[in-house]
Amino acid sequence: MRIALLLTVVLAGAAAAQDPERDVDGLAAHTFTRADVPVRLALSRVRAAYVAAVDEPSAIDVGLAHVAGLDRGSAPEGLLRAYEGAFTMLRARHAFWPRAKWRHAQDGLAILDRAVAFDPDHAEVRYLRLVSSYYLPFFFGRGDAVAEDFAALAGLLPAVRDDYPEDWYEGVVRFVVEHGGVSGDRRRALLDVLDEEPARAENP
């Protein structure tokens, strides 16, 4: 029972890092062209289901159905894999039995690791693995993956500001700055982008 309670607490913390008030429709828009609007719309549904699934377990199957329905040739494969892993981690959050929590968590982390290996330079893939791992206790052995994702995001984020919703982007940058142990030029670069006006604001 203590293990079940611990897993519930830490998985709740990971889910809380995904703010349901943020605009999720435009994430990873840089992956697509204007001709790919249907794919972007489908991915927006995946993201909305992920946010909903933090509190509502029935949204997990909805989100996975959206993922399964996407054309693997049009949508970024690594991102789809990452959402499969992230939804599986939410199954761990909502599971009642300790063994089920453990099994879903292990399965979800394995899927997320494969997603990062497939597309290590995709900021959203890195972020999904980071927030799924950051709050887990030490016996999950996720310290190296967390450090790797923080370092990767510190390098990726300055170049992708205009590709993401402002609130989401700034929230991720602040999370990396405050918790990622980023220093030197990379820290200064992240702080600089927080002080800049988004380029899209120049063309109202």
Image (spheres, rainbow, N blue to C red):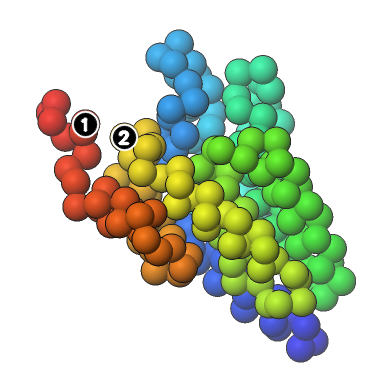
Q: State the residue at coordinates (66%, 43%).
A: 116
Residue contact at pointers 2 and 1, CB within 8 angstroms:
yes
Q: Residue at x 80, y 61 (%)?
A: 106
Q: Position of residue 51 (x, y in %)?
A: 51, 52
Query: Which circle marks residue 123 in the picture?
Result: none
Quadrant containing the N terminus in the rendered view: bottom right
Classify 10 Å Cα crowding around label 2: few (below 14), some (14-19), many (20 and above): some
Q: Quadrant of residue 81?
A: top right
Residue 108, picture quadrant: bottom right
Is 199 in front, or is 98? 199
C-alpha gap between disc 2 and disc 1: 7 Å
Give left or right: position of 130 versus 163. right
Query: In the shown orientation, is residue 124 left or right of residue 108?
Result: left
Q: Which residue bears the numbered disc 2?
A: 162
Position of residue 3 relative to residue 105, above or below, is below
| Spot occupied by residue 132 in the image (x, y as percentages of width and height) | 62, 60
Q: Residue furthest bottom?
A: 2
Image coords of residue 138 (percent x, y): 71, 77
- Residue drawn at x 62%, y 75% is 10
Question: Mark 1 Cα within 10 Å, few/some/many (few <14, many 20+)?
Answer: few
Total marks shown come to 2
State the residue position of label 1: 200
Q: Nearer the viewer, residue 28 or 22?
A: 28
Tell me if residue 167 can be seen.
no
Position of the C terminus by quadrant: top left
Q: Name the secondary structure under disc 2.
A: helix
Image position of 125 (left or right of 172): right
Of label 2 and label 1, which has the lower sequence position?
2
Say which residue appears at 43% left-offset and 63% top-offset.
182
